[in-house]
Image (cartoon, helix red, strand yellow):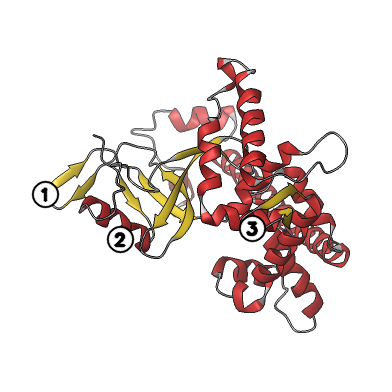
Amino acid sequence: MACHVGVLPADLLQTICGQLGGTGAKEDGSEGGLRFLRLPHPRTGILSLFLPSVIPQEGKSSLLEVQAVSPPNKRSWFMSNEVVEDGKLLVMTPIDPAFLLIPILRTTLPASGLGNFRPPEDLIEDAASKLASSTASGGNDSGPVISSEDILALSNLECVQAAMRRVCEYKDITPEITVYRYSPERVQSYLRSKVARLSHPDVSEFSRTLTRSLAKDGLLEDGKEELLKAGRLRRACDLVSQYLPRDVYAQLLSSYDFAALDAYMKVLKEESMALAAVNMNAVEARESKDMADGKAAGNDKKRKGRGSMGVEKLKKANIKGMSQLSTFFQKK
């Protein structure tokens, strides 16, 4: 079995340790919740790995995105007295299940209207069937085929059932039965609430990268409070966009007024380009002057270094035994 080095949340690590110790296995011998799922990435649509995690003691579930950090050259890990040949690092981080549901459930929208309310199992089964058939009809050259079983496995997770209420309209028929239908308006409302939370100063200031970016654009200066607020909103939208289809992100972005921020950033870009042009002109002028000075110095050296043809012949003449010219002007 291939060994890999990974970084994963502490609660999942405890669950795995419990299962390895024989305390987390189900009666049928399967490992509860620890089955990797290949699902379309919400932004690119490319099949990616996700790991559902269930903590039996607390009854909570979560979904982890699995990413591999691969070095450009061959490397290995030294773990105590063992060597792990594969040098890549697997990083497992929690992901909001709502992001995964958006591209999956939107396939259930009819050509016109919003469709009918359905139980969550039927809704996800319909989406799984359409996604699986769409990739299968593309042939082998289109890449791996989406497994309907992997998508259906989502409906059993408590965290996914809770996330469906964020992206769908729903009706409680009975305490045990709730029906849903995908709602683009509800999706946008949820995304705006997520952007509002991420753009709050108490949250955004935790990111040093975000703070440096705002400072670089001069948005942390006094008197630019409104621009700073818009800058935080824009960057929060950029963060959320990493897990959204392009059209959903474009719709989210259009719901904000960034006119003042865009105008400010345009002026900032023009000033930066003008400064770069001035610096480039100064460099070119200095290089041109250095080349001219070097050429002039070379010409002077050439002129001083070589005389006329007659002078050059006299320099080569044999003057051994000849008196110097000054001896003819001495007193006798």
Quadrant of the frame with the N terminus? top left
| Residue that carries the numbered disc 2 in the rendered image | 14
Amino acid at dot 3: Leu
Q: CA distance from mark 3 to mark 1?
A: 41 Å
Question: Closer to the N terminus: mark 1 or mark 2?
Answer: 2
- Between 288 and 188, the residue placed more toward the observer is 188
| Residue that carries the numbered disc 1 in the rendered image | 81
Amino acid at dot 2: Gln
Q: Tell me if residue 97 comes above or below residue 35 in the rendering.
A: below
- Classify 10 Å Cα crowding around label 1: few (below 14), some (14-19), many (20 and above): few
The answer to whether the residues at label 1 and label 2 have Cβ atoms under 8 Å apart is no
Left or right of 44, for residue 5: left
- Classify 10 Å Cα crowding around label 3: few (below 14), some (14-19), many (20 and above): few
Q: Quadrant of residue 54?
A: bottom left
User: Residue 18: x and y, percent?
Assistant: 26, 57
Residue that appears at 35% across and 37% down: 73
- Between 165 and 227, the residue placed more toward the observer is 165
Q: In this orientation, does residue 187 appear?
A: yes
- Classify 10 Å Cα crowding around label 2: few (below 14), some (14-19), many (20 and above): few
The answer to whether the residues at label 2 and label 3 have Cβ atoms under 8 Å apart is no
Marker disc for residue 239: 3
Left or right of 3, for residue 65: right
Q: Secondary structure at mark 1?
A: loop
Q: Given this view, does label 2 or label 3 mark the residue nearer the observer?
A: 2
Q: CA distance from mark 1 to mark 2?
A: 24 Å
Q: Given this view, does label 1 or label 2 mark the residue nearer the observer?
A: 2
Left or right of 28, for residue 277: right
